[in-house]
Image (cartoon, rainbow, N blue to C red):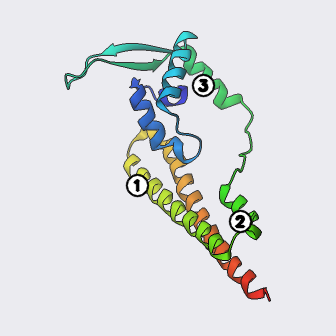
Amino acid sequence: MLGLLSFGEELSGYDLKKWSDWSLRFFYWSPSFSQIYGELKRLEKVGYVTSRMVAQETGNRDKRVYSITGEGMDAVRTWARESPVEPPVLKHGVMLRIWLGHLLETQQVRDVLGTHREYAEQMRQRAEVDIAGARGEEAWAYPTLTLKWAERYYASERDLADSMLADLEELERRRP
């Protein structure tokens, strides 16, 4: 939450969810509304964010917006600068299903890979669209770099699925 607020805008919980779905979901996580609001309360309690009520132009009820404090900015800056870089943990359900391929019919393995390939291509396309939407926004220069990473990552996942399908064909040709 501090990272999302570090761009200097006042954001509601809804805005934070929208922003995290727009960029963080590709590589880290997309929190639920309950996680967002729980975390915002905790951060406000420790003095890392402040909040205020704002009247909405639509006439709907007022909404609470949050902004990062100097202490919160120091905390997120310290974390970004000094925390050790953790290697990513690969938890890949598709790979696990292929690893258990001896329990499946060959067509089921193909279906798993085909479904994954479609998903990867859809995610690649979404990242590509989000990259285009962020062009020209100076504040989003670094998030745009992560969107480019996501676009490349999902392209490689798509290509890996294609390679695995070819490997599966080769495996089937070698079987008696």
Q: Residue 95 carries which label?
A: none
Q: Nearer the viewer, residue 176 or 41?
A: 176
Q: Which amino acid does label 1 sit on?
A: Val
Q: Residue at x 45, y 40 (%)?
A: 140
Q: Which residue is drawn at 51% across and 65% down?
A: 118
Report which residue position mark 3 lands on. 76
Q: Which amino acid does label 2 sit on?
A: Ile
Of the numbered discs 3 and 1, the one sitting upstream in the chain is 3
| Above-or-below relation of 137 to 49 | below
Q: Rounded to the nearest whole Å, what is the CA distance between mark 3 and mark 1?
A: 28 Å
List x then y, in percent, for residue 111.
Answer: 59, 70
Q: Rounded to the nearest whole Å, what is the CA distance between mark 1 and mark 2?
A: 31 Å
Q: Residues within 10 Å of mark 2 (few under 14, many from 20)?
A: some
| Above-or-below relation of 116 to 38 | below
Q: In this view, does 93 lie to the left or right of 12?
A: right
Report which residue position mark 2 lands on. 98
Report which residue position mark 1 lands on. 129
Q: Can residue 148 be seen in this view?
A: yes
Q: Nearer the viewer, residue 117 or 87?
A: 117
Q: Nearer the viewer, residue 133 or 20?
A: 20
Q: Residue at x 40, y 46 (%)?
A: 134
Q: What element carries label 2?
A: helix
| Above-or-below relation of 85 to 158 | above
Q: In which quarter of the image is residue 10?
A: top left
